[in-house]
Amino acid sequence: MTSLRGWPPIVLDGALAVAVTGMLLVTALVDPKAGALDIAAVLIGALSLVAWRRAPLVSLLVSTACMLVYSAHTDPGPPAGFPVMVSVFGAVRAGHRLLPALASAAFLGGGLAAKLATATGQSPQDLVQQTTLLVGWFVASGVMATVARHRQAYVEQAEQRAAEAERTREEAARRRAGEERLRIARELHDSLTHSISIIKVQAGVAVHLARKRGDEVPAALLAIQEASGDAMRELRATLEVLRDSDQPEPGSEPSASGLDRLDDLVERACSTGLSATVTISGVRRELPPEVDRAAYRIVQEALTNVSRHAGGAAATVRVDYGEEELVVRVDDDGPATRDDPPVPGVGLLGMRERVTALGGRLLAEPRPEGGFTVSARLPVSAEPPAGLPAGLPVGESA
């Protein structure tokens, strides 16, 4: 059986008006006392129920007047009160009390007076009993409307309380997240900042003493000094994000690193003994911050893996600015082979998470001719497409 809850109210009200009109029209047509005025009153009064929900007072006044005219000329019985009862229900449900009571009294009292003045075959006691029955129906209609009104108010209050509880939970969650970010920021500041500062200071002192003595400063020492400075810069940016009182956006991180610092990154990697070259193709342009940071981090992690796991290998960094996507690729000629692939570590997993979060594709696997390749295709749109898989195994594409 099809439920009526999904139907628009105007359709339901129209169906009700048509049904009541048909019922009363049949009663009026078979009544020899009914004339053209009575039929018109029936049509107007019953069809006014179309507005009982949207304009209850209009429906109440029209139906009461028309049905009172109809009842005064003929003897339709209780069916003549149906349009008025429906209108009384709608008016009371909308919060009106005085006008529904006056309309009910006018209809019932006027109808009784007309019947007493024109009735010849019925005793006054029978007419009063019929009117008393209608009074009970009108009272029941008002009571039902009051109950419906109170129930609607209760439902609205319950929805408001649920919304308030949800808002309170969200605020509490944001507050706890803010407190946790502050705690992490304090821990990072107290531990990493102190240690990196010592490294930077000690490296600076060693460089100063070497230059003061006229000795050649080792490249590794200069690399340590520069890397510690970059680490301090990025750590400060990270702490600023963590200490921000506003909730950070998903995927947000400090804007301290991007492809504009790619040359510094490769130069620092070369200072440690790694042989690396950079090739950029396409029209270089401004990228969405998330894509820019992800590309930088992928190159950074790939070069770190080459230095750590393929000592003495040469690396080639390629960045291709396409119309639809940015392609970042890092190849090395290290000892990795397809027969003995390296076990993916945290760094490769981090690459995969960055790329898939942006809706891109990642390839990280040994090359057929030997060595290892990391290739990431990142869409240059600001928002990643919806419906992406949550995670892709390293070495597979979306």
Image (cartoon, rainbow, N blue to C red):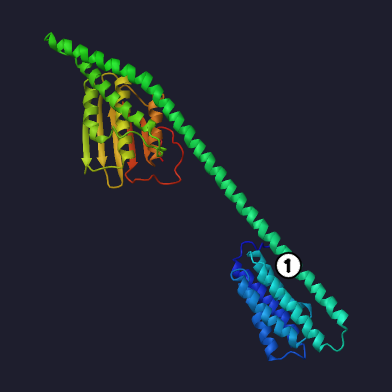
- Considering the image in quadrants, where does the N terminus appear? bottom right
The residue most toward the left is 214
Residue sitting at 69 percent across and 75 percent down?
103
How many residues crowd around disc 1 within 10 Å: few (fewer than 14), some, or many (20 or more)?
many
Location of residue 246 by image quarter: top left
Toward the viewer: 364 or 71? 71
Is residue 248 shown to the viewer in this render?
yes
- Considering the image in quadrants, where does the C terminus appear? top left
- SS class, disc 1: helix
- The correct choice, above or below, for 342 with respect to 284 in the image is above
Instruction: Please indicate whether residue 336 sits to the left or right of residue 265 in the image.
Output: right
The spot of residue 143 in percent (x, y) is: 73, 63
The three-letter code of the residue at mark 1 reads Ser
Location of residue 32 by image quarter: bottom right
The spot of residue 356 in percent (x, y) is: 40, 38
Instruction: Please indicate whether residue 341 sits to the left or right of residue 147 in the image.
Output: left
Residue sitting at 47 percent across and 33 percent down?
177
Location of residue 164 by image quarter: top right
Residue sitting at 64 percent across and 61 percent down?
5
The spot of residue 395 in percent (x, y) is: 39, 33
Q: Which residue is mark 1?
A: 141
Is residue 313 shown to the viewer in this render?
no
Residue sitting at 52 percent across and 43 percent down?
167
The spot of residue 71 in percent (x, y) is: 74, 83
